[in-house]
Image (tube, rainbow, N blue to C red):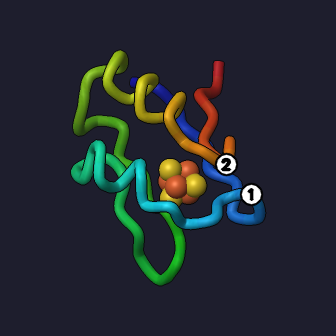
């Protein structure tokens, strides 16, 4: 399973990740909570690549 990091200081809360993969990316109390078990690695990499701020990164 992929490890995804989210940078709180970089994210500007566009909501793109949550709209694309709502089971993986959830906004709770202004933080993005990530459950990478809920989609394929390809789908998650695609969503990370579409983050307009660069706050999401795939580790490893
Ligand atoms: S897509 Fe990127 S900038 Fe938008 S809410 Fe998600 S992490 Fe934040």
Q: Which mark is residue 53?
A: 2
Residue at horizontal 35%, vertical 47%?
A: 35
Mark 2 is surrounded, within 10 Å at the Cα level, by few (under 14), some (14 to 19) or many (20 or more) other residues, namely few
In the image: residue 19, left or right of residue 1: left
Q: Quadrant of the N terminus?
A: top left
Residue at horizontal 54%, vertical 42%?
A: 51
For label 2, being within 8 Å of ligand 1 is answered yes
Instruction: Check the image and name the residue furthest to the bottom.
Output: 29
In the image: residue 57, left or right of residue 44: right
Q: Are marks 1 and 2 in contact (CB under 8 Å)?
A: yes
Q: Nearer the viewer, mark 1 or mark 2?
A: 2
Q: Quadrant of the C terminus?
A: top right
Relative to 18, is 30 above or below? below
Please give the count of numbered marks on the rendered protein.
2
In the image: residue 4, left or right of residue 36: right
Instruction: Check the image and name the residue furthest to the right.
Output: 9
Alpha carbons under labels 1 and 2: distance apart: 6 Å
The picture places residue 55, in percent across and down from the top left corner, at 66, 48
Residue at horizontal 54%, vertical 37%?
A: 4
Mark 1 is surrounded, within 10 Å at the Cα level, by few (under 14), some (14 to 19) or many (20 or more) other residues, namely few
Give the SS element for disc 2: loop
Q: Nearer the viewer, residue 11 or 4?
A: 11
Q: Earlier in the sequence, mark 1 or mark 2?
A: 1
Give the SS element for disc 1: loop
For label 1, being within 8 Å of ligand 1 is answered yes
Residue at horizontal 59%, vertical 28%?
A: 58
Residue on which disc 1 sits: 10
Relative to 41, is 34 above or below? below
The picture places residue 53, in percent across and down from the top left corner, at 67, 48
The picture places residue 27, in percent across and down from the top left corner, at 41, 69
In the image: residue 2, left or right of residue 42: right
């Amino acid at each position: 399973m992929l490890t995804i990091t989210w940078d709180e200081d970089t994210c500007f809360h566009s909501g793109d990740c949550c709209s694309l993969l709502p089971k993986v990316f959830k906004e709770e109390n202004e933080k993005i909570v990530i459950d990478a078990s809920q989609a394929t690695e390809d789908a998650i990499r695609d969503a990370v690549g579409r983050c307009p701020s660069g706050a999401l990164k795939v580790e490893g």
